[in-house]
Amino acid sequence: MALYFCLCLYGSECWAVTKNDVRKIDALCQWCLRMLLGINWQQHVRNNEVRRLTKQPHLSAIVQSRRLSLFGHIA
């Protein structure tokens, strides 16, 4: 799971993120979590349930906090 976050968040402090990007980032995160848990699309498991099982925050929230922490270091 740690490698997954490293790959997805590399350089995220400098990204200019739009609403469409946030949607795509969260969709990628959800897809990866489902793959790690072995859940396929036919099982009809809700996204909230996957989040509860993995105890992982949304990837877009992590990107936003990393961007804000970088802004604090620059200012």
Image (cartoon, grey):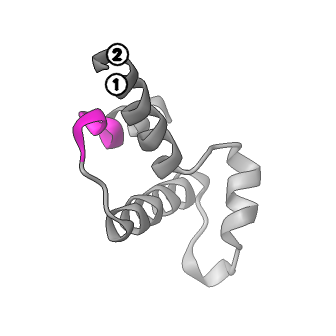
- State left or right for residue 21 relative to residue 2: left
Q: Secondary structure at mark 1?
A: helix
Work out which quarter of the rendered image holds the C terminus and state it.
top left
Magenta stretch: dominant SS? helix
Q: Please name the residue that numbered disc 1 is placed on.
A: 70
User: In the image, what residue occupies the spot 61% across and 54% down?
Assistant: 37
Where are the magenta residues, as a range? 7-15
Picture coordinates of residue 54, whole percent (x, y):
68, 46
Picture coordinates of residue 43, whole percent (x, y):
67, 79
Q: Please name the residue that numbered disc 2 is placed on.
A: 73
Hey, which quadrant is residue 18 in on the image?
bottom left
Question: Is the C-beta separation of discs 2 and 1 under 8 Å?
Answer: yes
How far apart are the two marked residues, 2 and 1, measured between alpha carbons? 5 Å
List the single residue furthest toward the top: 73
Hey, which quadrant is residue 68 in on the image?
top left
- State left or right for residue 47 relative to residue 66: right
Picture coordinates of residue 71, whole percent (x, y):
34, 27
Report how many numbered discs are placed on residues in the image: 2
User: In the image, what residue occupies the spot 47% across and 55% down?
Assistant: 29
